[in-house]
Amino acid sequence: MQLEQRINSLVQLGKVLLSIGNKETWKDFELGITEQEYNQLVEITQTVKHHNGWFTEREVLFAFRSWGESLTKENLTNWLGRYSDIKEIKKSVAVIMAGNIPMVGFHDLLCVYVLGGKVKAKLASDDQVLIPAVINILSLFDESVKDSITFIPFKLEGFDAVIATGSNNTARYFDTYFGKYPNIIRKNRTSIAVLNGNETKEELTALADDVFRYYGLGCRSITKLLVPNGYDLNNVFGAFFNHIYVAENNKYANNYDYHKAVYLMEQEEMVENGFLLLKQDEKLHSPIGMLFYDFYESKETALKYLENHKASIQCVVGEDYIPFGKAQTPNLWDYADNIDVIDFLNKL
């Protein structure tokens, strides 16, 4: 199957994901699949939370909707059109996926697939359901998927390159086992928001999406605020209140209660609103149910902070950066850790 045909298959998949993400009913055969096939995927969005309590229907539908909006003919053509030479790679690539948020490993898989390579995917234990279900739909538009994308339950063997995502700890093991292969090995990263004190209520409400989407588990989730000296944190709490629904998730609520108890016992200063703890802390990575913040004196000091921590920052939200509310909806060409996967694969 040629590149153009694979793009068309992805466009059709995008239409299915967008329809389900928008909670629409089956539209005859306009989507290219039967009502039963459509409803089976709908049911998975509702039941996958039994496999992973973080994968609530709200978050899964958001992931589907985001991918549906990305997988358009215009976006795919724009993405691949950025490269002067796209070739069929004819290689087998091991893709080791994280399982922290719904569909998190799909972009790496997509990159290998669109170039005609073979994917040997190793799913995270917490994410064994969604991506295989989506690939099953893709296979209805492209029969070659059954041979080109394989989910490996045990030891990975017979591959030419590796794309692996994990923690700083697992990255050391990845380096040991896969260092002799061409590889991309990703470590822990998180994201940060820089406020200047002039944000509108609408912008702060959009920032709440960047903080609470996927319960703060993604590398693009905002876990740290940089705010100017004297900033009134009540501005943030007021804009965040509509996301109180996160406390309905027992896993989130347990994290919130635990960290609140710990900091109270240690007599640490913090402010809270019943579902989020705000604490001044120099660290980047705040625990689930918390959001760290720090003050800065000038734009220059904020820039210096970002520069000093750039190896641990996935993205930055703010007036001079990614717009508020857009952290969790990257473009196809917004690569994790700024490592161009298509370029990597093209050089194999």
Image (spheres, helix red, strand yellow):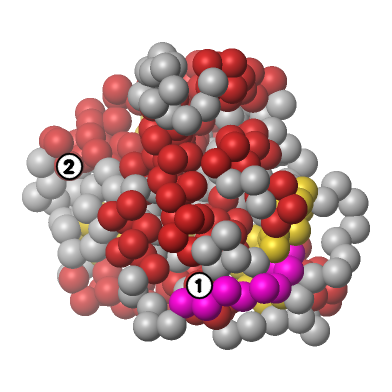
Question: Which residue is located at x 18 percent, y 71 percent?
Answer: 299
Going by the numbered disc 2, the residue's amino acid type is Glu
Counting from the top left corner in percent of width and height, residue 182 is at 70, 81
Going by the numbered disc 1, the residue's amino acid type is Ile
Question: Which residue is located at x 88 percent, y 66 percent?
Answer: 157
113 within the magenta span: no
Q: Is residue 288 left or right of residue 212?
A: right
Dot 2 falls on a residue whose secondary structure is helix
CA gap, disc 1 to disc 2?
Answer: 33 Å
Question: Which residue is located at x 79 percent, y 70 percent?
Answer: 159
Q: Quadrant of the C terminus?
A: bottom right
User: Circle 1 sits on which residue?
Assistant: 342
Residue range in magenta is: 86-94
Can you say whether 146 is above or below 47 in the image? below
Image quarter of residue 335? bottom left
User: Circle 2 sits on which residue?
Assistant: 203
